[in-house]
Image (tube, rainbow, N blue to C red):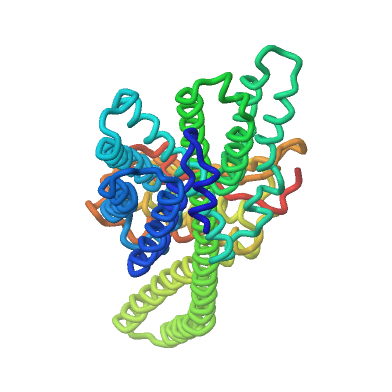
Amino acid sequence: MAWVLLFLASSSYWFLPAGLRLALLWRLPRAAWPAMAALEWAGILALSLWRGAFDRPLALLASTTLPWLVYAVVVSVFAQRDTRAAPLGSLLPRLLACGALAALANSVTLLGADLLDAGPLQSSPGQFLFGYGLGDFIGVLVLAPALLALDEVVRTRQSSWRELLAYGTVLLPPVIVLLAARLPVPQPLVYALVLSLFPLFWGASRFGWRPAAISLLLLAAVVHGMQGLLLVWRAEQLQLLFSACAIAALLLGATSENVATQSKALMLSLEQLRRRGTDLVDIARRLTSVQEEERRRLGGELHDVLGQDLTSIATRLRVVERTNDDPALRAGLQSISQLVTQAHQHLREVTEYAYPAVLDRFGLARALSEGPLMQLARDAGMQYRCEVHGDLGMLHEEAATSLYRICQEATSNCVREPHCNEVHIVFELLLALADDNPPESRLIMSIHDDAGPIAPAAGRTGVGLQNIRDRANALGAQYRFEPGHGSPRHWVSLPLEDAPT
């Protein structure tokens, strides 16, 4: 019934059953093709006999069976095996290419059928092929995408009817044709058709290929119904213009839809990466916190237990030394007392490294300017400076501890470098202005040295450098290490959430 109705609505301008044929071949499983072919052949045969279209049985048989076979062969060769599984937007160029090739091949078969039936043609073979081919192709452009779009809405329900009709904007091109045809200008139909292309392309880029296909179907129906257009334009000119615009609109809609889909997928991937990055920062922060707590516990135990034991040993040694008159024994006790004193000093250094009590007592600025790091550098014969521009008191305890540990690791690395004679630590607080968008305050810490180029081991990262990176990552800070020079060697940029503007 659809074939008969579409055939009756066709003309030399378009052949709508070609679009129905391609859409069914594209969507139906291969097992249903024989039934489709039988129904189509029955309809064509009945119409041909009713109209008396052919005089010779061979021409009637060829015109009845060959068009379907041509389209089926083209779809079998060039379409994917299961086109129902893939989204049609990505396959739309392949669908249009199949339609163009099938229309061209079908025009050759129809030319052969006419030669078998009537002998010499009234027009040239080129004009015959051009007219038949464009008629079939316009039928494909107008009907096949629209039918497949309707099928997707009904079958998958991935989009609503409002989205398919683009909230009514699909009516803009045909409405503009109807309105512009009444303009008080010479040949208003020329302006009507050209002006209708602007909302067609806009709708394709804005809503995708499905509303563009529906809009094309409505526009083609209006153009076909206005016989004046066929008087202003020659049939071939109108067919070429409409074909080019239809291809451009459909491909533009498919491209915009693919770009939108890829953008959504990209945004989803970015969101997942952001969440994973946040999770990694939280994990690194928890590990750093646990490590710091463990260091403080061990430092406290070393200071309270082992330190007191060493102090008791030193006190008893001094008592025994004073109560003994043997010079040799007193000399031995003094030697042991000195070893205990050295061990106590080493224990104090280890305890200070594990648990920087100076940080809790005096804060980050004084701990770096006057604390153990300065003494460590000076004991190694190095110059040590720390400059602080801004108030570091706004830093929370975790950030202050991590920054202190970074400076501690960097200073220890400089002490181990044979060519390093100077360490310079600089803190600079950059407060956001009130009109910044978005406002963001940052703390910049840079550590300079004069050790020159440092060549890390190929393919390996030192434990100290990795610890610095882990500390920076746990804070959510940006970190850079410069092996080529020490100006600066380490650079850390920490965003401050609660800093005043």
Q: What quarter of the picture does the C terminus occupy?
A: top right
Residue at 49% in and 66% down: 284
Q: Which of the two residues, 246 or 461, is positioned nearer the viewer here?
A: 246
Residue 490 vertical position relative to residue 246 in the rendered view, above or below: below
Image coordinates of residue 17 in percent, x first then y, are 46, 48
Q: Which of the two residues, 31 or 355, is positioned nearer the viewer here?
A: 31
Tally of numbered tags = 0
In this view of the protein, can residue 167 be seen by the observer?
Answer: yes
Q: Is residue 457 left or right of residue 440?
A: left
Residue 332 vertical position relative to residue 273 in the rendered view, above or below: below
Residue 239 vertical position relative to residue 37 in the rendered view, above or below: above
In this view of the protein, can residue 420 be seen by the observer?
Answer: no
Residue that lies at the very extreme toward the left in this rendered image? 458
Q: Which of the two residues, 416 or 311, is positioned nearer the viewer here?
A: 416
Residue that lies at the very extreme toward the top in this rendered image? 186
Image coordinates of residue 103 in percent, x first then y, are 35, 41
Residue at 65% in and 59% down: 160
Image coordinates of residue 188 in percent, x first then y, are 68, 18
Q: Is residue 479 left or right of residue 366?
A: left
Residue 468 vertical position relative to residue 229 in the rendered view, above or below: below
Image coordinates of residue 184 in percent, x first then y, are 76, 15
